[in-house]
Amino acid sequence: MKLELKPFDFAQAVARAGLRTDGTPLAARGAPAAQAPSFQQAMTQALKSVSAQQSEAQRLQRELQLDNPQVSLEQTMVAMQRAQIGFQATLQVRNRLVQAYSEIMNMQV
């Protein structure tokens, strides 16, 4: 699985959310918009992707240890770094979610 980091495009992110750049909702058009994945679906897909990257890195490590000539050290190291970056990103998202949950729970109503 290829992992590409792209610069954040605010206008594209706002358009995906169905908003204008000033934060107001886009006007409803005749055809219904395609249903965007829910937060739960997006998180599930991201976690599955990270898990797949970790499994691939472990598989390449095993193959390298067994002296498979079709697996290179460079390929294995890149897969390990991708898995580590994905895991660190997932950990940061989890930390932010826990922090936001704590802040909301501590709000006075």
Image: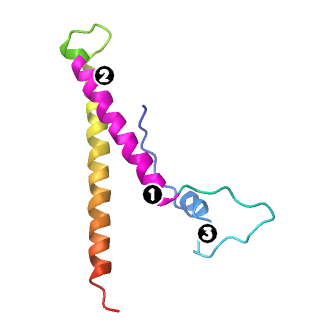
What residue lies at 35% left-to-right and 92% top-to-bottom?
109
Q: Amino acid at mark 2?
A: Gln
Quickly name the residue at label 2.
75
Q: Quadrant of the N terminus?
A: top left
Q: Amino acid at mark 1?
A: Gln
Left or right: residue 71 versus residue 20 is: left
Quickly name the residue at label 1.
40
Quickly name the residue at label 3.
19
Q: Which residues are magenta?
A: 38-62
Sooner in the amino-acid sequence: mark 2 or mark 3: 3
Label 2 secondary element:
helix
Q: Residue furthest bottom?
A: 109
- Residue 84 in percent (x, y) is at 26, 40
Sooner in the amino-acid sequence: mark 1 or mark 3: 3
Q: In whole angstroms, how far apart are the C-alphas of marks 1 and 3? A: 21 Å
Q: In whole angstroms, how far apart are the C-alphas of marks 2 and 3? A: 41 Å
What residue lies at 29% left-to-right and 37% top-to-bottom?
83
- Main SS of residues in magenta: helix
- Residue 52 in percent (x, y) is at 36, 35
Left or right: residue 101 versus residue 14 is: left
61 shown above or below 46: above
- Residue 14: within the magenta? no
